[in-house]
Image (cartoon, rainbow, N blue to C red):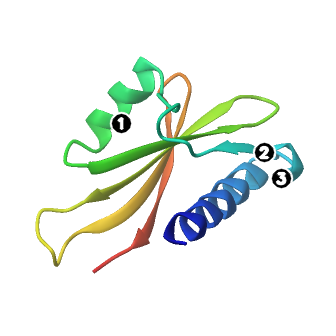
Amino acid sequence: MKKIVLAALLLTSVSSFAFSNGFAASNVIVSTDPVHVVPPAPVQKSFSSQFPAAVNVKWSVVSTPASLLWVADFYQGSTASTVKHVKAVFASDGTFLGKQVVSEP
């Protein structure tokens, strides 16, 4: 159940992001299978430099008519009172496009 809710939240947030950038929501395809989703090296490098303390990172990919968007779903923070659930979006070339804090302590 938790995975279904998370997948729905991911689809909603990524669809909103894609729609706000001029893509029709009907053209958005999401893959959330973490076994098969491995971002390209530029995306991994950009992610590591932007979020060096990230833990429990799970990737998904959104296919739009213009490009692929890579979504990292992770936790960041050093103590229980500072841990945040975050989603970050990257272009295939590693360009950081934005982040969304899903939940805060």
Q: Residue at x 55, y 72 (%)?
A: 1
Report whether 44 appears left or right of 95: left
Work out whether 49 lies above or below 100: above
Give the SS element for disc 3. Answer: helix
Q: Earlier in the sequence, mark 1 or mark 3?
A: 3
Between the C-alphas of marks 1 and 3, the distance is 25 Å
* Front disc: 2 or 1: 2
Q: Marks 3 and 1: in contact by CB < 8 Å? A: no
Q: Which residue is mark 2?
A: 28
- Residue type, numbered disc 2: Val
Q: Which residue is mark 3?
A: 25
**Coordinates of residue 8 in the picture (x, y in percent):** 65, 65
Work out whether 5 lies above or below 20: below
> Dividing the picture into quarters, in which one does residue 65 lie?
top right
* Quadrant of image for the C terminus: bottom left
Q: Residue at x 78, y 45 (%)?
A: 28
Report whether 54 appears left or right of 58: left
